[in-house]
Amino acid sequence: MKLFVTGGAGFIGSNFVRHILQKYPDYKVTNFDKLTYAGNLDNLADIAQGERYDFIKGDIADEAQVNEALARGYDAVINFAAETHVDRSIHAGARDFVLTNTLGVQTLLDAVRRHDIKKMVQISTDEVYGSLELEDSSQFTEDTPFQPNAPYAAAKAGGDLMCRAAFKTYGAPVVVSHCSNNYGPYQFPEKLIPFFIFKALKDELLPLYGDGRNVRDWLYVLDHCEAIDLMVHKGVAGEVYNIGGHNERSNLDIAKIILKELGKPESLLTFVADRPGHDRRYAIDASKIERELGWKPKRDFATAIRETIRWYQEHTNWVAKLEARKAELNPHIK
Ligand SMILES: NC(=O)c1ccc[n+]([C@@H]2O[C@H](COP(=O)([O-])OP(=O)(O)OC[C@H]3O[C@@H](n4cnc5c(N)ncnc54)[C@H](O)[C@@H]3O)[C@@H](O)[C@H]2O)c1
């Protein structure tokens, strides 16, 4: 198969590109990425020289660029490209989020139709569903109504709804996933887990929003990649699949695990003013993809989080290069 992966220079996209090239010796992958502050070609340095991989710098919201690239002929489009940082969508403005996460998705849908591509997988988030209460045991299902609270989540919901409309109107061969929080190697250090690891390694305070009790359902990134792999090959057009780790943890618990693993004291924990509109709890019912596509998360959290922490400790060059770019490219990192 020839896959057109958008946003492949980011965290999950780069893990997915590597997963595909390693698992399928005859597949080819084109990585189409705008290289925003979050795009990092170093994430794919180990496979970039191979003949089965190529890179195109481009914007999914730019019709001409997308059409020129897709005219080369592909079997499937897998869209990871997005503005992804909730805090940026609040503090730096939501315009870029709407352009990429909504208009960019529509641009891909139009191009998929024009070039008669047989499958598109839209990677989305559980954040479109809004927030759950801490106190109950409810979970998001594929039928939970969209109630996004952050501009990031609303812009993702816009893209997902355009996918639904493209399927209902034109029979577009599009499949949408809603996944919970991912962790693993190559994640940009504005996100909670690498952010806390880097803070702890430097003996700096780990700032927790509010009371630190906000809960996320954490999934190892390669488990997510395996779910997407199944959606590419077996996902049914027009269907939506929730993906989650059955692994709810508070931000405070995550911070404590990182400190313990790195041998740092809990006195590095500090509580700061809450994020506006901060969702309290996310939890995913992933029974549909388990039942219909045969997916299950394989990695045990205790082991995978330890390996993830070790990966950041061992990849000091990767970290140092990002640190050098931080002030220039991401003024909102904190
Ligand atoms: N990280 C998570 O925990 C998580 C959970 C669920 C869903 N998701 C979704 O998975 C996808 C990937 O997330 P991530 O954490 O890897 O993101 P990321 O921020 O690490 O990477 C995003 C990538 O998209 C690229 N990009 C941004 N705008 C673009 C555009 N207009 N055209 C082309 N490329 C563009 C960036 O350069 C970057 O390489 C996103 O759609 C996100 O909503 C992420």
Image (cartoon, grey):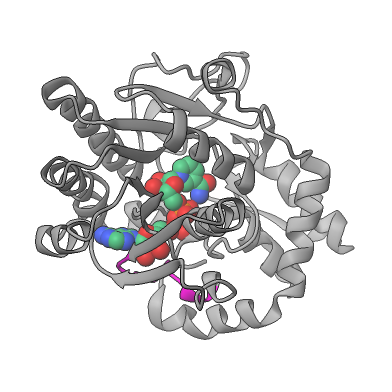
Residue at 17%, 26% in the rendered image? 165
Check the image and report above or below for 146 versus 143. below
Look at 58% across and 45% down and name the residue there. Answer: 182
Please indicate, yes or no, whether residue 4 appears anywhere in the rendered image.
Answer: yes
Residue 253, quarter of picture: top right
**On the rendered structure, is 81 left or right of 200?**
left
Which quadrant of the render holds ligand 1?
A: bottom left
State the image coordinates of residue 93 (x, y, percent, origin top left). 26, 57
Question: Can you say whether 316 is above or below 79 in the image?
Answer: below
Residue 28 placement, left or right of 271:
left
Q: Note whether 90 is above or below 59 in the view shown.
A: above
Residue 326 on the magenta span: no
Closest to the observer, 321 or 323: 321
Asked where in the image residue 47 lies, by quadrant, the reply is: bottom right
- Can you give x and y, in whole percent of width and height, for residue 179 in the image? 49, 35
Magenta stretch holds residue 41 = yes
Which stretch is magenta? 33-42
Of residue 95 and residue 122, the one placed in the foreground of this image is 122
Our reading of the magenta stretch's main secondary structure is loop
Judge from the rendering whether residue 57 lies leftward or rightward of residue 168; answer left or right. Answer: right
- At 12% across and 26% down in the image, what residue appears? 170
- Which residue is at 53% across, 64% downward? 188
Q: Where is residue 241 in the image (x, y as percent from the top left)?
A: 45, 25
**Can the viewer see residue 256?**
no
In percent of width and height, residue 323 lies at: 56, 80
